[in-house]
Amino acid sequence: MAKNKNLKRLNTMHILIYKRMKNILFGFIALFSIAIIQGCGKSDENILVKTLNVDSLVQKDSNLSLAEFVYKSGDFITKKDFPPLIHATDILYNKSNFLLIDIRSASEYEKGHIEGSYNVDRKEILSFLKTKVNPAEYEKIVIIDDFGPTGVYVATLLRFMGYNNSFGLKFGIATWNKQFSENIAKNLSNKFASQIDTVGLARPKFGALPLLQQKPFMDLLNEQVKKNIERPDSQIFITADDVFKEPSKYFLLSYWSEAKFVKGHIPGSVRYDIRADLSYSMNLKTLPINKKIVVYCNTGHQAIALVAYLRLLGYDAVSILYGANSFMNVEFAKNFEEAGITDVNTLTADFPLIVGKTRNAIVSASAN
């Protein structure tokens, strides 16, 4: 917790320094960026994951489920960079080395975007990456959305397609420039703090995995990734208002530490630790296949990455928009200062925006 707190303070300090020394900083950004880029060579791990070793897996066991296949092909959900997040300050100093993909609508993109970013409809991302750019030329692929979680959702699914250098911008364009801070502020609330519980439910017994079509692994994987990237936000998010209306309708999955869980959670929740807990080799099969799974965490970024993983495997899963900060942000901040959001200004910067269309604006990857 202390480490997370220090990281948040460090990120906030960067933003404050930038705001106060804006005029001086712009004069040195170019030189500073060159120095950093020269000192950061590209590695195989950061460029593109190796092709999944499909043949060897199939030869060993032709009856693997997709969940087993994902597990034996690297089990990204257990890795230290799950969820795949990147901060605005990292982009500021390294954006010439990054492939920036802005998945907001064309109208939102034209209101202001990061210099050099491509405006790509998320339904076209896979085609765009295969036909319009060479991802291996970039240190990182960064997905940018309105407020963060959707970009992380897409970046997580791209990881399963082999784009091991894909990341979502934490808090989206809203953290890049205060012009878009309302994208965060509108999702914050303390309205259900009086209804939280401190005792959770036990995990269910082990059961079955979701049934998926029988087809070659890579065909199934490609189909699942494409289908889920194209899902509208209405199918991957749920509001706290809807959950608290009738929480018993859902399997409530609290995706955070025991320390946070015992301080307060939605009544009827079951807690799972981030990363290893929901690997195929651990407790994945304790999740229901006949009930909608509602996942929540601090701000929704970890939860939506898990939703991407679960939907890939066939579960009906959604994330609460902005997690605990959407229903008990003030209460949350009292107990966990680094996790509760009460002042949006601590998250938003005043980094430069490009307004209007640019030569990099590609709403559809099929465009010329």
Image (tube, rainbow, N blue to C red):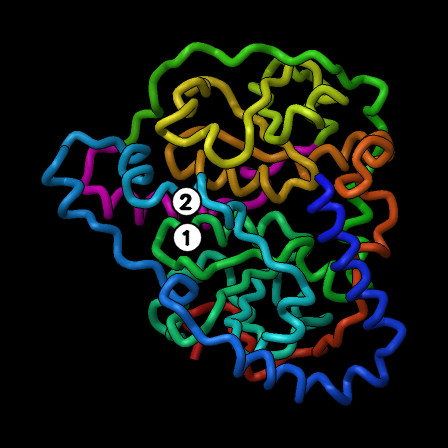
- Whether label 1 touches label 2, CB < 8 Å: yes
Q: Quadrant of the N terminus?
A: top right
Q: Residue furthest left?
A: 59
**Residue 52 coordinates in the image, percent (x, y):** 25, 51
- Left or right, 67 with respect to 33, comes to left
Q: Is residue 294 visible?
A: yes
Q: Quadrant of the C terminus?
A: bottom left
Give the residue at mark 2: 76
Residue count near mark 2 (Cα–Cα under 10 Å), binned few <14, some 14–19, many ≥20: many
Give the residue at mark 1: 159
Report which quarter residue 356 is drawn in: bottom right
Lower sequence index among marks 1 and 2: 2
| Residue at the image point whose x is 44% and y is 44% from the top | 228
- As displayed, is residue 29 above or below residue 49? below
| 355 inside magenta stretch | no
- Left or right, 129 with respect to 347, comes to left
| 229 inside magenta stretch | yes
